[in-house]
Image: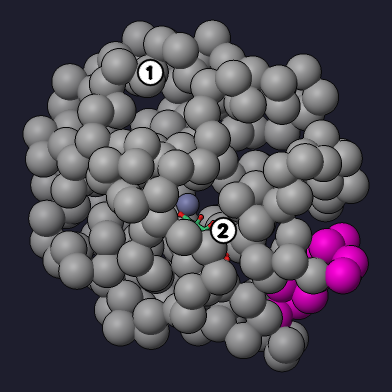
């Protein structure tokens, strides 16, 4: 069942020199924090990792939705749990057989999600829906913030929504990349219920107002 709109702010767009301050400002207005972990191998960029998550956990009570853009997510499960992550999302392109990493995440009491890149068809993910607390459809190529939303991925969001509902699953449907007041409405109509936004929150002069604007636009209130 499609749930209410939830906003996950991606700290990739925050000022890393003032990360605690940036998070504290938006925390009361958010549903979760989206934490992009990269290894410079699965994607051509490196963002942050376990020590930064551990520091953030000391100053934030939010759920940490950790998006692992890494070739070997398995070895990160335990360190992330200790650092205070609440859920991990793993790329199907990196882990074509996600059963073992899902079990490891469950043992660590972490939520588990699978994510697919823009070029990966929905059908690749479909057999694994039952493993997931969340599925994530990338609406940009992973690795960098500030890219333009790819509307072609909306058909995959629709397909995931149909499958989740048809099978009566309690699986959140997240979308990540280029989400702003112009694009969030279409993503919501396609069936997404968790919306990642980096630039559209931390890149704005007033991130708190920006979050409110995203919520309004998601419910069809216009940009
Ligand atoms: C891209 C990341 C995204 C990114 C989104 O690899 O997965 O979470 O931070 O940034 P915006 O919202 O700026 O497109
Ligand atoms: Zn992300």
Helix, strand or loop under label 1: helix
Residue found 71% across the figure and 21% down from its top: 55
Judged left or right of residue 6, residue 90 is left
The residue that mark 2 highlights is: 196
Q: Is residue 166 visible?
A: no
The residue that mark 1 highlights is: 77
Residue found 38% across the figure and 80% down from its top: 150
Q: Is residue 25 above or below residue 178?
A: above
Q: Which is the main secondary structure of the residues drawn in magenta?
A: helix
Residue found 38% across the figure and 18% down from its top: 77
Q: Bounds of the magenta span?
A: 205-217
Q: In this view, does 56 lie above or below 213?
A: above
Front residue (pair 159, 54): 54
The image quadrant where one finds the N terminus is bottom left
Q: Residues within 10 Å of mark 2 (few under 14, many from 20)?
A: many
Residue 122 pos. (x, y %) = 19, 63
Mark 2 vs ligand 1: CB under 8 Å?
yes
Quarter assignment of residue 205: bottom right
Check residue 212 for magenta coloring.
yes
Residue 4 pos. (x, y %) = 62, 59
Q: Is residue 217 above or below residue 100?
A: below
Earlier-in-chain disc, 1 versus 2: 1
């Amino acid at each position: 069942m499609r749930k209410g709109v939830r906003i996950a702010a991606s700290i990739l767009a925050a000022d890393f020199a003032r990360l605690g301050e940036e998070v504290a400002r938006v925390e009361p207005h958010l549903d979760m924090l989206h934490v992009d972990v990269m290894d410079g191998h699965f994607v051509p960029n490196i963002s942050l990792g376990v020590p930064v998550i551990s520091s953030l956990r000391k100053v934030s009570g939010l759920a940490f939705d950790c998006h692992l853009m890494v070739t070997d997510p398995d070895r990160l499960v335990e360190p992330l749990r200790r650092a205070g992550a609440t859920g991990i999302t793993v790329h199907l392109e990196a882990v074509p057989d996600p059963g073992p990493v899902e079990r490891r995440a469950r043992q660590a009491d972490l939520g588990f999600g699978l994510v697919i890149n823009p070029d990966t068809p929905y059908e690749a993910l479909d057999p694994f829906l039952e493993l997931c607390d969340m599925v994530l459809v990338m609406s940009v190529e992973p690795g960098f913030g500030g890219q333009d939303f790819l509307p072609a991925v909306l058909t995959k969001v629709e397909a995931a929504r149909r499958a989740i509902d048809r099978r009566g699953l309690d699986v959140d449907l997240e979308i990540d990349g280029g989400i702003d007041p112009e694009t969030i409405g279409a993503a919501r109509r396609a069936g997404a219920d968790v919306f990642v936004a980096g630039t559209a929150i931390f890149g704005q002069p007033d991130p708190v107002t920006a979050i409110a604007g995203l919520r309004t636009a998601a419910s069809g209130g216009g940009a």
